[in-house]
Each structure stands twice: as C-alpha cells, then as structure tokens.
Amino acid sequence: VRRPGELPEIPTHLVRTLNAGNEIEIYQYPNIGDVIFFQNRYHDIRERVGRDGKAFLIITREITYTNQDKALLCITRQSSIRR
C-alpha cells in the first residue's frame, strides 16, 4: 500500500538495507497552529563497489518541510546502503 508522498521504489536486486546516517538543517521552528507540509525526493543515488567486489548503492532521500506560508522550516537527509 502506497502512502501519500512516498517515493517510488528503486528497481534493484539488492535487498539488504543499512542506515548510513541522517542530517538535519533547521531554519526555523514551527508555531502553534501551523500547518506543516513536506516534499520528498531522491537527493542522490550512487553505485559503488565494495572491497569484496560486489556492487552496492548509497541512496540519499531529502525531505523539505514548510509551513502554510511556504516558509522553510527544515531539511532532513537520510542515507541508506542497499547491498
């Protein structure tokens, strides 16, 4: 079941997923009563080869949060490794 705002799956035979890190940039805090919106996107997808000679992917997703006035609240980036 797909959820609103969910990104499409990356077609790959790699099934193991590992967390590669998170970062957040805070621009301003929301006020009580604000309506929060978000926009999901793939920030970066890189293919690498490990020491064992097997390929893996480093996938970075970026989520931008804004309020009802379109003021930027924060940006989060979540990186994962697909092996």
Image (cartoon, grey):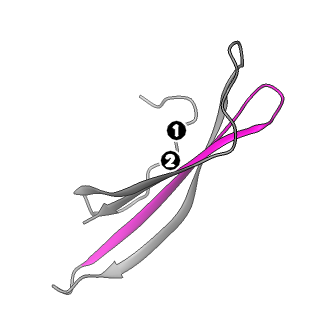
Give the CA distance from mark 1 to mark 2.
7 Å
Tell me, yes or no, if residue 2 can be seen here: yes
Q: Residue 22 location in percent, x, y?
A: 42, 53
Marker disc for residue 58: none
Residue drawn at (70%, 21%), measured in percent from left and top?
A: 31
- Please rate how many residues cluster around mark 2, counting C-alpha atoms within 10 Å: few if below 14, some from 14 to 19, many from 20: few
The image shows residue 15 at horizontal and vertical percentages of 24, 57
Asked whether, in this view, residue 31 is left or right of residue 20, the answer is: right
* Depicted 42 relative to depicted 53: above or below: above
**Residue 59 is a magenta residue:** yes
| Amino acid type, mark 2 | Pro
Q: Read off the residue under disc 1.
A: 6
Q: Quadrant of residue 10?
A: bottom left
Q: Position of residue 18 (x, y in %)?
A: 26, 57
Q: Main secondary structure of the magenta part?
A: strand
At label 1, the amino acid type is Glu
